[in-house]
Image (cartoon, grey):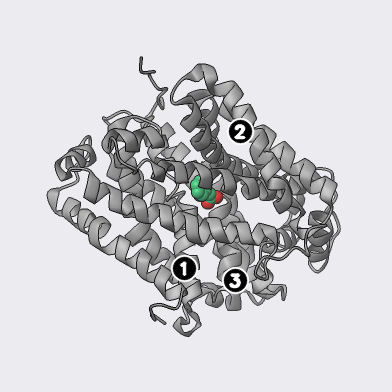
Amino acid sequence: MENKQEQWTSKLGFILAAAGSAIGLGAIWKLPYVAGTSGGGAFFLIFILFTIFIGLPLLLAEFTIGRHTQKEAISAYKTLAPGTQWHWIGKLGVGTSFLLLSFYSVVGGWIVIYLFRSLTGGLRGMKAEQFGQLFDSTISNPTLVIFAHFIFMLMTVLVVQGGVQKGIERSSKFMMPALFLLFLLIVFRSVTLDGASEGIRFFLMPDISLLTGETILFALGQAFFSLSLGVSIMVTYSSYLNSQESLPKSATSIVGLTIFISILAGLAIFPAVFAYGIEPAEGPPLIFIVLPAVFSSIPLGEFFFVLFMVLLLFATLTSAFSLLEMVVASITKGDNKKRKKATLVTGFLIFLMGIPSALSYGPMSDLLILGNNFFDSLDYVVSNIMLPLGALLISLFVPYRVKKAVIYEELTKGSNMNKHIFNIWYFLVKYIIPVVIILVFLNVLGIFDLF
Ligand code: PHE
């Protein structure tokens, strides 16, 4: 007997939950520091191009698979390509989500710590220069980071146990709009600081000579990371959507929102980085050093910082929900009786997996893999290898395994996408995207010389 899956209650609920999955640490924490270490504006430009010409079409591809089959990812591939090995795309997605959430939750924990600190007045009276030191001493404290990582995973587990509608959808509805508003406030403060213009230039004026094969791969990985692509999460999420809704419209809104928040994040961070003389190539700590400094120069800054941390925590949680949901759905396959236990056990295993990442800036900082600590290495493998690989496989699966007519019907249901646009999309997915992903890989391996 097939189980009837739960569904989103409305189209808005779906868009917000999918946008909630997309918008998170990728746009707000990762993008600024990766841009900071990889050439600023040039990196950002390539990232935007990848997001529009590769991310958006692939998002639509994942949506098509999910909504057409109305099944979580692994079963979805099995349904469309029975008796073949294509379901490994779904399994790869589950494995990737598992690993990704393990270090994602560590950063979620850092946010929990900062939120707690700001609530208890622990940041009061500090000068811009002191935030770097504070951050170092925070993330090198093993008990604190593991405890915070635990709390973050616990919150994620509790919501995902609640299921699709009550848990995930309901909480996404009010958090996203509030986050946008608060971001506008920080951007306003940041760009009006003395010396801000250098930061704006760094972020928005591309210096193409700074691009290397590796930065291009990072930009590709970042585009997938911040749209939650390549892990089939968007397959699973769109399987909870009914067929009256327009997929192209939903995908475009999600990509638009993600680009918008990425720009806001860059404009919030880089002007302040230069105004305060912070190193743009600071790496993962960047926003934890810059944002407290910006807020400390705003009237009522302490209050706004608490509010910002709450919203950042929500944005991070909504992405974490999707990562955990991906793993849980592959176990429960729509059977809600199994949900509670499956969520708890998976959540606990992910917590354990995250411990070495949590200790990477403290007791385990000497353990280097090819010059990077455990946290950075895991992030590298997930973001720059596993996500692009998953995306590549999806871009092969859709045009080569699924009948064109089936895809056309699914994509045009409830939408006014015309044949012309459909053909452009199909061409991109079938010919351009796989070639670009393979070229970027070969380029990094030195087999093909693009730059
Ligand atoms: N998109 C999320 C973010 O930017 C992270 C994520 C990646 C979530 C991949 C799911 C899958 O924070």
Label 2: state its secondary structure: helix
Mark with earlier residue (1, 3): 3
Q: Residues within 10 Å of mark 2 (few under 14, many from 20)?
A: some
Which residue position holds label 2?
346
Between label 1 and label 3, give the one nearer the viewer.
1
Residue 126's x, y, as percent? Answer: 84, 60
Residue 130 vertical position relative to residue 406 in the rendered view, above or below: below
Residue, x 82% and y 55% (percent of image)?
A: 138
Residue 366's x, y, as percent? Answer: 78, 65
Whether residue 103 appears in this view of the structure is yes
Quadrant into which the N terminus falls: top left
Viewer-nearest residue: 443 or 134: 443
Residue closest to the far bottom: 209
Label 3: state its secondary structure: helix
Residue, x 64% and y 40% (percent of image)?
A: 350
Mark with earlier residue (2, 3): 3
Residue 237's x, y, as percent? Answer: 42, 36
Amino acid tagged 2: Thr
Between label 2 and label 3, give the one nearer the viewer.
2
Per the model, the C-alpha gap separating discs 1 and 2 is 31 Å
Which residue position holds label 1?
217
* In this picture, residue 426 sits left or right of residue 278: left
Amino acid tagged 1: Leu
Per the model, the C-alpha gap separating discs 1 and 3 is 15 Å
Q: Residues within 10 Å of mark 1 (few under 14, many from 20)?
A: many
Amino acid tagged 3: Gly
- Residue 36's label in the rendered image is 3
